[in-house]
Amino acid sequence: MYRLALRVADALDDAGLDLWASGIRSCLDARTTLARQQHLVVELVRLRQSSAIRVAGCADDVEQALARLELGLGEVDVPQQPLYSAVRGLADHLELAGGRTWLRRLRAVVFDPDRSPAARVTRLGEVVDRMEPGTDGLPEGSTPLVRAVLERLDRHRDQRTVAAYLEFALTPPAPSRSAEASPAG
């Protein structure tokens, strides 16, 4: 699984898709093997849905990785996929468009060890609900992404599972190969 994920990340790096490559690498930081596999599956499915992956010539790498994971897990379609993709899309937008203050707030809620999974999900909804156009620090173009998260957040009953997928979606990216090769300083 590690070699598989790293091969996809390398292909994304080669295509200049560093943030997505870093997202694949971050899947390998999950606490358990099952969590690493689950995170990798939802990230690969999200990437498979992107036309940029096809344009960059990485679609075959993503499909091969998903096929191998499906053999091991039996299923790659999970009900939390739309929520994961919406939250991850918002996180990527905030990262790239200067909304890091909001991204830190979302991560603080989702990774709060003092809250139960249900409390983290509820609190995340409250924070996202405050992300209205014109709000200080919210980058332009956030509105449809915020709406997508809010529309999907309340669709699930199993709050523990939802909280886990929210953690996956808001896991900070691991360094890309280009960042690792850059001199410090």
Image (cartoon, rainbow, N blue to C red):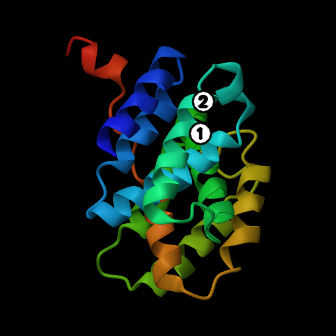
User: Residue 60 vs residue 113: left or right?
Assistant: right
Query: Where is 162 relative to 96, above or below?
Result: below
Residue 66 rendering spot, x and y as whole percentages: 54, 47
Seen at 49% across and 78% down, the residue is: 161
Seen at 47% across and 53% down, the residue is: 69
Q: Secondary structure at mark 2?
A: helix
Going by the picture, which residue comes out furthest to the front?
Answer: 71
Residue 143 rendering spot, x and y as whole percentages: 77, 51
Q: Out of 167 and 96, give the one closest to the viewer.
A: 167
Going by the picture, which residue comes out furthest to the top?
Answer: 183
Seen at 59% across and 25% down, the residue is: 58
Three-letter residue code for mark 2: Asp
Query: Where is 59 relative to 100, above or below?
Result: above
Three-letter residue code for mark 1: Glu
Alpha carbon of mark 2 to alpha carbon of mark 1: how far? 5 Å
Task: Give neighbour class at mark 2: few <14, some 14-19, many 20+ (Cα, 10 Å).
Answer: few
Residue 131 rendering spot, x and y as whole percentages: 67, 59
Residue holding disc 2: 60
User: Residue 71 vs residue 142: left or right?
Assistant: left
Q: Out of 82 and 123, give the one closest to the viewer.
A: 82
| Res 177 → quadrant | top left
Query: Where is 59 relative to 163, above or below?
Result: above
Q: Is residue 101 visible?
A: no
User: Residue 80 vs residue 35: left or right?
Assistant: right
Task: Give neighbour class at mark 1: few <14, some 14-19, many 20+ (Cα, 10 Å).
Answer: some
Q: Is residue 44 visible?
A: yes
Query: Where is 65 relative to 181, above or below?
Result: below
Residue holding disc 1: 63
Pointer 2 and pointer 1: residues touching (CB < 8 Å)?
A: yes
Q: Out of 28 and 155, give the one closest to the viewer.
A: 28
Q: Secondary structure at mark 1?
A: helix
Residue 36 rendering spot, x and y as whole percentages: 35, 57
